[in-house]
Image (cartoon, coloured by chain):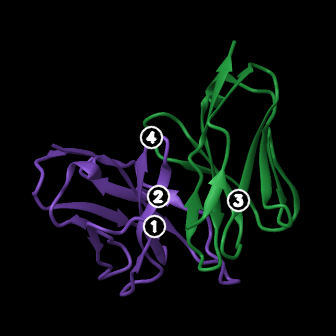
Chain colours: A purple, B green
Amino acid sequence: IAGITQAPTSQILAAGRRMTLRCTQDMRHNAMYWYRQDLGLGLRLIHYSNTAGTTGKGEVPDGYSVSRANTDDFPLTLASAVPSQTSVYFCASSDSTERGELGELFFGEGSRLTVL
Amino acid sequence: GQNIDQPTEMTATEGAIVQINCTYQTSGFNGLFWYQQHAGEAPTFLSYNVLDGLEEKGRFSSFLSRSKGYSYLLLKELQMKDSASYLCAVRDGDYKLSFGAGTTVTVRA
């Protein structure tokens, strides 16, 4: 079982370029998330999706967009990358329990992005 | 936004016990999670508390007091492999999960 797959694992990007980070899960989880992790700041939520067809903004959404066309895929796009978007990006997913409470997050291995 | 505080670093000796505290202020509460993250790796789930009290899972225990906005993670019989960052995360009233900055635990021989 692959769980959550992120691609690319690492990328160096020129400022101003467009970049899409891919995320695919095979656990049929309803909810998916994108976090960025920066030293001293921890994991910060960028965007999330509680179910296919819906998305929402997290704590730091500016400069990023997402789509959720189906249950398995949740790509994150940087329309015009800037150096402050240099970070490690983690995709995660979680299931909904019978009581309607979301379960624990399962994380991908991360995508390390450097914007020059 | 949410406010989740935990110490930046802790050091302990192999075989000892370490307690990592976490205080939080969030809009609503739907559970508190602890995750472990080794350097260069993804976070992995350790424990979940939604009711007050202690949850024990092997060498790891987690405690929650909702009225005090407080939790701790207790690591017993420390091993070298426990050297990692420990992340406190709170699920708010909208079911969004916010993380603290993490506590780096270093276990010394």
- The residue at 27%/50% (across/down) is A84
Q: Callout 1, which amino acid?
A: Glu
Residue labelled with disc 2: A44
- Label 4: state its secondary structure: loop
Q: CA distance from mark 1 to mark 4?
A: 17 Å
* Mark closer to the chain start, 1 or 2: 2
Chain bearing mark 3: B
- Label 3: state its secondary structure: strand
Query: x and y percent of residue B22 in the render?
Result: 72, 50
Query: x and y percent of residue B34 in the render?
Result: 67, 52
Q: CA distance from mark 4 to mark 3?
A: 20 Å
Q: Callout 4, which amino acid?
A: Leu
- Relative horizontal placement of residue A65, taking residue A45 as reference (left or right): left
Q: Are marks 4 and 3 on the same chain?
A: no
Q: Which disc, if any, is residue B24?
A: 3
Which quadrant of the figure has residue A20?
bottom left
Q: Callout 2, which amino acid?
A: Arg
Q: Is residue B36 visible?
A: yes
Q: Are marks 1 and 4 on the same chain?
A: yes
Q: Label 1: few (<14), some or many (≥20) within 10 Å? A: some
Residue labelled with disc 1: A59
- Label 1: state its secondary structure: loop
Q: Which disc, if any, is residue A39?
A: 4
- The residue at 48%/80% (across/down) is A50
- Label 2: state its secondary structure: strand
